[in-house]
Image: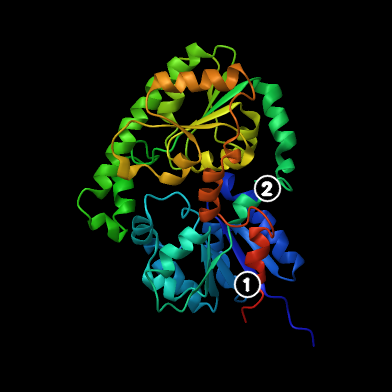
Amino acid sequence: MDRPPKRLFVPIETKVREFHGKLFFSLTAAEQGFEVIMGGQQQMHEHIARWAPGIYMDKSIAETKRRWCRHSRSLGNVMCSWDEEGLVVFSEDAYFRLRICREVFDQTRCFFAWGPSEAGAITSRIKDGVCDVHATGNPRFDMLRPELRGFYDDAASALKARYGRMLLVNTNFAFANFFLGEEKVKEVYRAYSISEDPGFFSGWADAQRESFALFEEMLPVLRERFPEHTIIIRPHPSESYAPWEELASKLPQVFVHGEGNVYEWILASEALVHFNCTTGIEAFFLGIPAISLRRPGHEDFHQPLPNHLSHVCNDLESLMSMLDEIVGNTGAVASLLEDADRLKIANHHITGMRGDFASTRIVDVLKTID
């Protein structure tokens, strides 16, 4: 008698960020014989007991996953994971203390790291773990590769037709502008052991508040400097839209949008301005100029990777000069992908940008799980 296919649970927490990559991953798994159940994380948690056990592909192994991991395992599921937030970090030590819970790690069969950097941050600190750590890359970045990015061409063309020449502003200010308020964000982060470090979260919050104010100051200047461009503000999914919508309402041809995958918005734009954001890394691989804008100071709270893979500006004058060079003479600013040092940094942090897709690498490991 033929054995039934292995079941794979693929939960989605933030649809605009995760859906396309996890859909490609799920299709890759289905082609290899898996029965895949993909859906919203909350709904999956509510209904998972209705299905026979399978492999549950979680989005992290952080402190907040303790209770869920125990429950899922009690239903007979094998826990595997990658970390959706594991790429943009302050340092390897801060990453480990903020994102890795030893109890959850020990109950996880396989962990799939973004690249050698994340894998090393774990294995250098846990030398007796039973969880296998694989540097495979992440399915989200499969969609950045030349073989797949054409998926976004129609959507990007539609955005260009709708808005004309575009400048994209991606914000990342959960501490300064959390959608449920400041007290709630403090409550969320108190679940992490690193919150016990004096000054860690207050320093992080101060760095965000100062650069948040800089972005608010920047938008009217940007509007005046580039009158022929539409400016799109795309807040991080954890942010409140209210302050950005209030500011945009006072400026012509400035809009706040969060719909759709950010890749189509990046491809439709002439340049991207961000703060400590994964979109700076994504723009790097898509060949779109990205500028990291932040107040100087608080250097311990500026994530190195998106800044290494972007042009960096610490004030509005240098930002406007850089944008003048980018939009005033298309092609004058060389793609950062051509910088060997930056590419070396990117490869240390991200596997799967050439050769086998990250999805293929992960599925190949999952096939070995009994």
User: Residue flagged by tag 2: what amino acid is it?
Assistant: Arg
Is residue 182 in sight in this rendering?
A: no
User: Residue flagged by tag 1: what amino acid is it?
Assistant: Val
Secondary structure at numbered mark 2: loop
In the foreground, 1 or 323: 323
| Residue on which the image places disc 2 | 145
Q: Which mark is residue 84?
A: none
Label 1 Cα neighbours within 10 Å, binned few <14 / some 14-19 / many ≥20: some
Q: Residue furthest left?
A: 198
Identity of the residue drawn at 74% across and 48% down: 147
Is residue 238 in sight in this rendering?
A: yes
Residue 98 x %, y %:
35, 57
In the foreground, 67 or 323: 323
State which quadrant residue 61 falls in. bottom left
Q: Residue furthest front?
A: 340
In the foreground, 172 or 323: 323
Identity of the residue drawn at 74% across and 41% down: 150
In the foreground, 64 or 152: 152
